[in-house]
Image: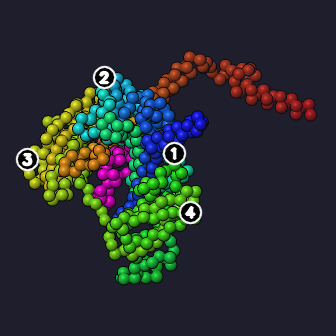
Amino acid sequence: MLSFLHFLLLIALVACASASSDYHERLLLRPLPQSTLLASFNFRSMESSVAFAQQNFRYFPRSFGQILQHAHTKELHVRFSVGRWDADNWGQRPWHGAREGGTGVELWAWIEAQSEEEAFSRWLTLVNSLSGLFCASLNFIDATKTIRPVMSFVPEGDHANSTSLHLLHGTLPHEVVCTENLTPFLKLLPCKGKAGISSLLDGHKLFDASFQTMAIDVRPVCEGAGGSCVLEMEQTVDMVLDIARSKRPRDDPIPRARPIEEIECDTGKGYNSGDTCYPLDKHAEPAWNLTELFGRPLKGACPLTEETGDDANTLCINTPPERTIQVNTTGKYAETRSASDTLRCYKLPIGAEFDLVLPEQQMTTGLVRAEPQLYAARSINGHGQERGSVQAVIKNPSETDAVEFVYLESLPWFMKPYLHTLRARVDTSSENPVRETYYRPAVDRRRGTHLELRMVIPAGSTLTLTYDFEKAILRYTEYPPDANRGFDVAPAVIRLLAPYQSVDKKGIYLRTTSLLLPLPTPDFSMPYNVIILTSTVMALGFGNIFNLLVRRFVGVDEVPALGAGGLKGVIMGKIERLKAKLGRA
């Protein structure tokens, strides 16, 4: 009887653990204009706060959890991004920009500490530990690349029980994101890329995309005031694939011209002939399937995913109702459709490959593209090696609503802006759009410039923000090996406030592109020229002096005919010996 009670208690504990910690994953495919496809991978795992504190990890990766515990990090957001989101053609950003980062690496976290010095010390511990975990150069995030935002970021998690939280933010715009960062990202997943939608993630396809970002978000989630809390970890991969480019086989990456008999020509062109062809634009959706696009098959569902409710639908595709979609699999799957019939979701089989095949089809229903809330672009103006200016153009496409937002700039210390030259102009109004300003100037080689502006842009207007800056001269040891390329400046971060508000605390963000700043660069070939010239002069001078001191000059008649030393004596000796041999013969 006692053993049976122990068995029931064990079942209850397992049920409680399963209720408080679970794992879900989902892939959303959305066709975009110009034969492109947006693939959004989302992996979400939750662990009870009690189990996390006791290091009793189930789905949460132990290596990642121990780093957060050691650095006293309560909430963390990491971004690895490459490319640029084309808002003009692709529309609104996935996840409203909440899971997007600036070019390179972007990181911000809420750290529990009693003072700013202690928080910064734990921040350095965090970035150095994550640098080794993700094979990235996060250890280069020092005091010069770290800021403390005051308006741009808000916590996504519930921190009612946490006190003395400090927000720190760092960027590495020059970091090159590659496969070395994808492999540790996949190892954090329960199925580690062997099953589930993560089996589609291939480095050759991911980093060949027009745009891609990898995000990791850790936050505490509590059920009401005083309720139980769980630690939620969300991993996201968003990529925009060019369908024609992705369908090329890996052993033939360079597009080659096909024979003219295999090309469908536009015969309506006046110059069409047997040896001249203009390709025919069919205005049809191209054919593709998952295996062609991602270079590998989808190996069924991850066995650890929950299979109840909407979480059972692992793969979804957003297409018009008339789009033909075929399913290739040997396992058992289920398909559900939304009320508008534009979203089709599939429950993947376990242990069997799954593939979606979309043939080429002439469409009558166009793609639905949500318009972004704001458009933003930033550039460097001016000429010369001493000064320059930055111009940011922000456009509000809405004709009815004004938009309030926060504009964040994190500039390197060698790019020194003049705050008195800051100008914000709206083309439809003479009113100053700046409502609040936070400015922390740079200190040479100690910290960068931190600028935050809360502004309002009227409906249907364009806001132009400009300021002048001065370029500093670096020490020759502070230049990178590719100094003539320039220095990367982190993108500006824009957080929308009103009237757009997210319901899940993630916020609505967009980022501009990074900037390339040319600095006064010395001629690094001059030391080489000086060394070569100096060495030549020293060699000539030393050689002549050494020759004068060591060499003995004598006349030709003073050299003995048969004496040792002297070329003439040696030759004459050999001649005499040769004559002696011939005389004896």
> In terms of secondary structure, where does tag 2 sit?
loop
- Residue 495 falls inside the magenta stretch: no
Q: Which residue is mark 1?
A: 190
Query: Is tag 4's residue or tag 2's residue first in the polypeptide sequence?
Result: 2
Task: Give the CA separation, mark 4 to mark 1.
Answer: 22 Å
* Amino acid of disc 2: Ser
Q: Which mark, by number, is residue 423?
A: none
Q: Residues within 10 Å of mark 1 (few under 14, many from 20)?
A: many
Can see residue 170? no
Residue matched to label 4: 331
Residue numbers of the magenta segment: 78-106
Residue 264 is situated, as x and y percent measured from the top left of the image, at 45, 78
Q: Looking at the image, which residue sits at the far top?
A: 549
The amino acid marked with disc number 4 is Gly
Q: Are marks 3 and 2 in contact (CB under 8 Å)?
A: no
How would you rate the neighbour count of disc 3 (Cα within 10 Å): few for under 14, some for 14-19, many for 20 or more? Answer: few
In the figure, 149 relative to 459: above or below? Answer: above
In primary-sequence order, the first of circles 1 and 3 is 1
Colour scheme in the image? rainbow
Secondary structure type for disc 4: loop
Above or below, comparing residue 473 to residue 499 in the picture: above
Distance between the alpha carbons at the discs numbered 4 and 2: 57 Å
Residue occupying image coordinates x 21% and y 46% = 497
Marked residue nearer the N-terminal end (4 or 3): 4
Q: Is residue 161 left or right of residue 275?
A: left
Residue type (three-letter) at the residue carrying disc 1: Pro
Q: Residue at x 8, y 51 (%)?
A: 429
Identify the residue under disc 3. 431
- Residue 322 visible in the snapshot: yes
Horizontal and vertical percent for residue 45? 44, 44
Circle 2 or circle 1, nearest the eye: 1
**Circle 1 SS class:** loop
